[in-house]
Amino acid sequence: MTSSVAEAVWTVAQRFPTGVSVVTAGAGATARGATVSTFCFLSREPALVSICLRRGSWVLGLIRDHGAFTVNVLASDQESVARRFASRARGADQFDGVGWTAGEAGVPRLSDTVCWLHCRPHEVIAAGDHELVVATVAGLGDGPGRTPLLYFAGALHRGAIESEDT
């Protein structure tokens, strides 16, 4: 694919709105996180999800080493959290000023999210300059009433979700 075609595909792909999540892996001083918009549910039975991470990323290495990660679906007021974990900051610096607790296997679980899913890798598939991680859901929780942070057209947006409960 030529670079002009790749750029055109990326421009069109940004027209698809997605939720914003931070994937955390490792524990203690080795913990890292990465902001992703490529999280989805794959299967109800068995409960499978997927994420895509840049090949060679710290978080991908930690997932392989520790066999666990957490997907933290960000709320509309967590844009600063999304930006922090999208930066190249390393280690404990990433978590400075961000509320979190040690979840299953010590993996950081961010506070005040829409929901979180603790996952165990099932299969990792090479996919271009990224790797697709298919995982089983081992634990989960939600923050009722939280509105999601969305990514659309290259920018972050506060979600506006209407439901019968509101």
Image: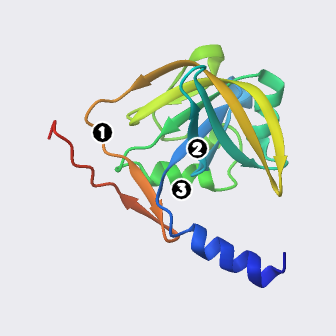
Residue 80 in the image, given as x and y percentages of width and height: 46, 53
Q: Earlier in the sequence, mark 3 or mark 1?
A: 3
User: Which residue lies most toward the bottom here?
Assistant: 4
The residues bearing labels 2 and 3 have C-alpha atoms spaced at a distance of 17 Å
Q: Residue at x 78, y 42 (%)?
A: 58
Q: Tag 1: Cα neighbours inside 10 Å, few (<14), some, or many (≥20)?
A: some
**Does dot 3 land on a helix, a strand or a loop?**
helix
Whole-angstrom CA distance, mark 3 to mark 1, is 19 Å
Circle 2 sits in a helix, a strand or a loop, which is it? strand
Q: Quadrant of the rendered structure where residue 45 is?
A: top right
Q: Position of residue 5 (x, y in %)?
A: 75, 80
Disc 3 residue type?
Arg
Q: How is the image coloured?
A: rainbow
Q: Residue 160's quadrant in the figure?
A: bottom left
Dot in front, 3 or 1: 1
| Lower sequence index among marks 1 and 2 | 2
| Amino acid under disc 2 | Phe
* Type of amino acid at the residue the image marks with label 1: Arg
The residue located at (65%, 71%) in the rendering is 10
Q: CA distance from mark 1 to mark 2?
A: 18 Å
Name the residue that disc number 3 marks: 83
Q: Quadrant of the C terminus?
A: top left
Residue drawn at x 65%, y 15% as measured from the top left: 105
Residue identifier under label 2? 39
Give the residue pinned by disc 1: 146
